[in-house]
Image: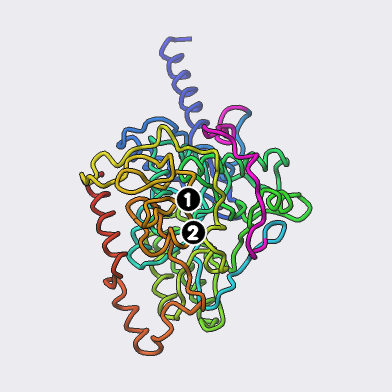
Amino acid sequence: MHPHQILVILAILAGLAYSLHGPIELNNAIEEPVTSQDQSESLRLKLRGVTKQLDYQCGPSYGSCPSGTCCSSADKSPVGPPTKEIPRPHIGRVPYGPQEIRSCTVPGTIALTFDDGPTRYTGDLLDLLDRYDAPATFFVTGINNGKGPIDDPSLPWAELIERMIISGHQVASHTWSHEDLSKVTPEQRADQMLKNEVALRNILGSFPTYMRPPYSSCLPGSGCREDLGDFGYHIVLYDFDTDDYKNDSPNLIQLSKDIFDRFLNAGNSKINSWLIIAHDAHEQTVHNLTEHMLKTSKRLGYRPVTVGDCLRDPRDNWYRADSTWVGQKNKKKTPKKGPKKSNVPQQVSVDGTCGANYTCLGSRFGLCCGSNNVCGNTTTHCGHGCKKEAGYCAIHVPPNGDAWDPVSPGGKAAKSEADSNVRVVGTAAATSLVLALIVAMWM
Ligand SMILES: [Zn+2]
């Protein structure tokens, strides 16, 4: 055979090999398949100087991989003491597993929930929710889609999760690597919950009591619901699904808006409430659908709240503290290019005190810095005099459960939808401005 014929054959073989290793075809999951955010997300992280953990071909939504070659994120573990031995009493009146929660109980409330984050879109979503002064609930995953562990201080996720708390949102668990909890062994199920607990504890000093199973799958007979009850979790599903994961394009997202409008228009804010699922992993959800949901909710007299608030569960019950935790040694300090304010907390409180130099976030003493410069979770700490610059300050649901804007029927409500883009509310506006400045200077 002539040498150039051999070269041609080699070239053909190389081409074949390349095509066989091309992009992996995504399988359609039952719920919430993940968008292919691979390339742009990789680029964004590279621009941030983060070059590791960019393997985005992992996770259950990507189908199966050859043994030991791809879906290894479930095998990774967050660093730090385990949470397994922490007592898990069922506190409060909201049912724990095996019972599932599918709706809110406070009339006139709407609980928008976002699964699968934090992602590259989550910061924009937090900006939007700040602008509308609208608390929401985030069911966060620890490491799925190869985004890297949420508690890795070199990645942006931990700060986004802290910001969720600071802005008055609820943080809940969506497992470590988004496995179908009905299809795994009891040991793997425990692993999925406990690893995410450690990672969230590393960020917040406590971990959630609320969770949503990936794919909303926790089937009777699998042992899933009982196990989650034993772990001390409320299993949260939803009234209706916006189907946003199916409609993540400018041409299709109207279908999700139509679903949302159909349900809300059929209800009455004096007697109804809503628990709704969406995903901050999808661009159109964050940049299009959510503002529509907020405007429509307000026009119809609903008040956006967290899941805990829509069930009238006191905030103290949303998390379990790790009393042995003394803060993360490698916790990232304030943003490198943030405003140079001397009163920005730089250390996690190690003795329960807080204020100018110490934050309650990430400590084991509670997330709110009270007027007495002590961390805690009670109303005294989180209410009047709470220091927002040194921890979280709760916004509780009024005891009467009144709707968000009950005195704006008819024409006034219609007008408020049109101008609600520019309507900003006191502290929310100030917070947004400061956060926008930090983000702008940081990018
Ligand atoms: Zn999910």
Name the residue carrying label 1.
366
Q: Is residue 429 visible?
A: yes
Among the 4 quarters of the image, the one containing residue 43? top left
Q: Are marks 1 and 2 in contact (CB under 8 Å)?
A: yes
Task: Give the SS element for disc 2.
Answer: loop
Name the residue carrying label 2.
378
Q: Up-down: is 13 above or below 62?
A: above
In the visual, does 311 lie left or right of 431?
A: right
Residue 166 in the magenta stretch? The answer is: no
Q: Up-down: is 234 above or below 83?
A: below
In the visual, does 250 lie left or right of 224?
A: left
List the single residue furthest toward the bottom. 410
First in sequence: mark 1 vs mark 2: 1
Residue 86 in the magenta stretch? The answer is: yes
Front residue (pair 382, 169): 382
Q: Please say which color scheme the image uses.
A: rainbow
Q: Which residues are magenta?
A: 68-95
Task: Give the SS element for disc 1.
Answer: loop
Total marks shown come to 2
Circle 1: residue type: Gly
Q: Disc 1 versus disc 2: distance between alpha carbons?
A: 8 Å
Identified at 68% across, 51% down, the residue is: 228
